[in-house]
Image (tube, rainbow, N blue to C red):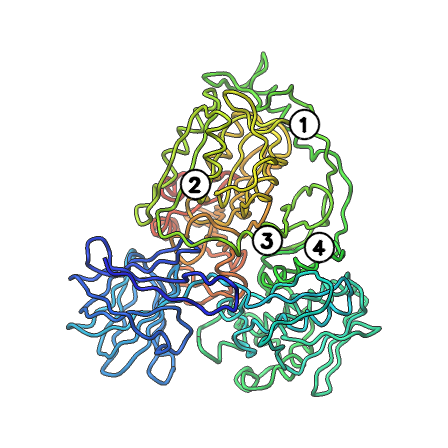
Amino acid sequence: MDQFGGRTETGASNEHLQLSFRTTDEGTGLLAADPIERHQFRLSTPNPVSPTASDPSEFSFPADAAVRIRTDRIDLQTVVSVCVRDDAGEMLARTEHFAEESFGPGTYSVELFAPIKLYLRVTGPFSVSSDADRTTIDFGEETAVLVGGRSNHERPAATITTPDDPRAVMDAMSYLGSALKTTTVERSYPTLRGHPPLIERGDRFEVPDGLEAPDTGVTVELPAEYSYLYVAAPLVYYLGATVKEGQTPRIVTDEGFVYDLDTPAGFEVEVERVLKRAFFLDCLTRTEGYYEVDLHERRAVEDELDVEFAELYDRSLPAQLETYLGVSHGVVADHVPEWKLTAHIAPTAENVEVVPFAANDLAVVRTPRSTPTTSPAAQASAVDEFLRTAGPTGGRASPVGDFTRSATPPGAAPDREYVRPERTDSIEQAWIGEGTPVGASKASLQAYRNRLDREPNEGDIGITVVCNDPKMAEERDVVEGVYGSREELPFDVRMHYDLSVAELRDVLAADTEFLHYIGHIDDGGFQCADGALDVSAVDDVGTDAFLLNACQSYEQGTHLVDAGAIAGIVTLNDVVNGGAVKIGQNLCRLLNSGFPVRSALEIARDDSVIGNDYIVVGDGSFSVTQVQAAFPNSCTITRRAENRVAVDYRIYPGSANGMGALVKPFLPGNEQHYIASGSVDVFELTESELAEFLSLENVPIISDGGLRWSSTTSVEDI
């Protein structure tokens, strides 16, 4: 088996293999593999191929590795969007489902929007065709094809050291934009924004040799206070701005434009509006550039804007920004896509190290304002559910009787300080401060660091299921049939039962992508056959993500993150077994389908009476497996009238496909692309059109308040 890999020069002390190509086990085709993100994609060929390593710089776009093969046809395992350009870079076509495009003699660049970013360089003629399931690129005869690819994994290029002085932090923030791969409007694409350099606390200010702050002509002036700096950091990064001290927060450009950030709406709200407006209007302007697509959002607002996008595309960043900020916020507010993340970051010196990660997500940053609260009504719901299902007049019965997954009586509340962050309109919320959040993830610097330190793995996706109580075998049996059920991905599913303390310690130490724990957890830790394992005494764990489907597992989950995990789902209180089985089944299906941890919980939570008992700890944007299509998506389906339904189509951005990506929902009559985040649009379909749509991909659908899956749902069920 031939294998060819590429490395990306990051400036970091330890380089990671970013992407590799190898022949498939059958020999007919190539397998592209991203060993850090655990993604792979197959390019099948009718006959065996013999790849030879090639120079990835032959592509117009950045590539980590490249190989050359000879074949007359390439079949893709799913329908992917294909963008074809001529040798001058002019886009000729972009294909989707049921496409049929032909190209004559010439040299072409072919971009594949697969789970791994892939490129082909080929001399035509050739054709691109697709049906409901597959895409085929046909060359007619044996042809030399250069195949390249790029990993979505981004490592910061450097680390800046700063003392605990807001003025020094300003200097460090001026380098955040050094990671941008372009300062044109194309930086609104997530793949053209690199991860900002890390910031570490130290005795003196130090910038590594060779790291240069961008010169975009934009300066952000701020008071020398952490509360101002942290809120502005994602905007500073996106604009590639220099940060200077000023009494009044404002934006100043070298072309004489000044924009106050201290407005009646408030500094934090104004920064959010500026970030969203600049990003959104960049997305509209870029349709004059690399990808000349029919963008829904541009159509929706273009008539209300006095903007010539073709002319604006070639102007300087300061000139573009001045034009954007001359547009009233109210004109675009209802058209800006749902934002991926709001991060509530306490303005303390130690949280300066979190700033690059918030900037990388283009998060809306808020200074934590919360309402102290008691246990989040979750304990009451657990007790009520327990009494309803297991009491003398309980409505339904379990074969073994229902019970809480606790070693203590229901209602024994743990000693925690709960906080309820103020509500925002972002898809996700993260809390980085004191207290246990209700309605938000408990994020941490250690989780972000663990994500960056993730080691390459060329093997199968590891799923570990531990059931430490035979009375909970119902959930074990359910999830055993779900994990690893995707034929196109290699899984290694390991099942464990009734482990001892030593055995569980060994399982936690073993490398695995995901741990699904079913059992009891109490103040002493994980309950085992011969005692309890407290993970606070474990120095290192091998699991990337986890679900601790046990009572009061919050503390043990945070210990797993401290010991090396990236993200996990935990419980705040006691959970009833019947409810835990249901939410565990939903979560395993969502995670197995490629949903980010935080999004998976949001969907599963809404389908459960005990959903508010569960929260995410760590980096909730992490995905255990790659998604089948380009993005994790769901549909909320509502009947409108006889033979008519409304489909609310939602996208869930993750770490590998952040703000700014494009999606074209394959729905009857739709020819437009959308900015892929949140609810992109509501489409009205006939029943037959809905049936055809549901047959394309197995996705979660919400109907009549319940969570279902399209593969097992008929139109009559809705």
**Foreground disc of the pair 3, 4:** 4
Q: Is residue 169 above or below residue 132?
A: below
For label 1, the residue is: 380
Q: Is mark 1 on a helix, strand or loop?
A: helix
Foreground disc of the pair 1, 4: 4
Give yes or no for contact between labels 1 and 4 (Cβ–Cβ under 8 Å): no
For label 2, the SS is: helix
What amino acid is found at the position of numbered circle 4 in the picture?
Ile
| Tag 1: amino acid | Ala
Cα separation, mark 3 vs mark 1, equals 27 Å
Q: How far apart are marks 3 and 4 (CA)?
A: 17 Å
Q: Where is residue 221 in the image (x, y as percent from the top left)?
A: 76, 74
Q: Counting residues from the N terminus, which is met first, the one under dot 3 or under dot 4?
A: 4
Q: What residue type is disc 2 on?
A: Arg
- Tell whether label 4 touches label 2 (CB within 8 Å): no
| Residue that label 3 marks | 427
In the rendered view, would you say 287 is above or below 526?
Answer: below
Report helix, strand or loop for mark 4.
Answer: strand
| Circle 2 residue | 589
Pick whichever of labels 3 and 1 is earlier in the sequence.
1
Asked if disc 2 and disc 1 are in contact, CB closer than 8 Å, the reply is no
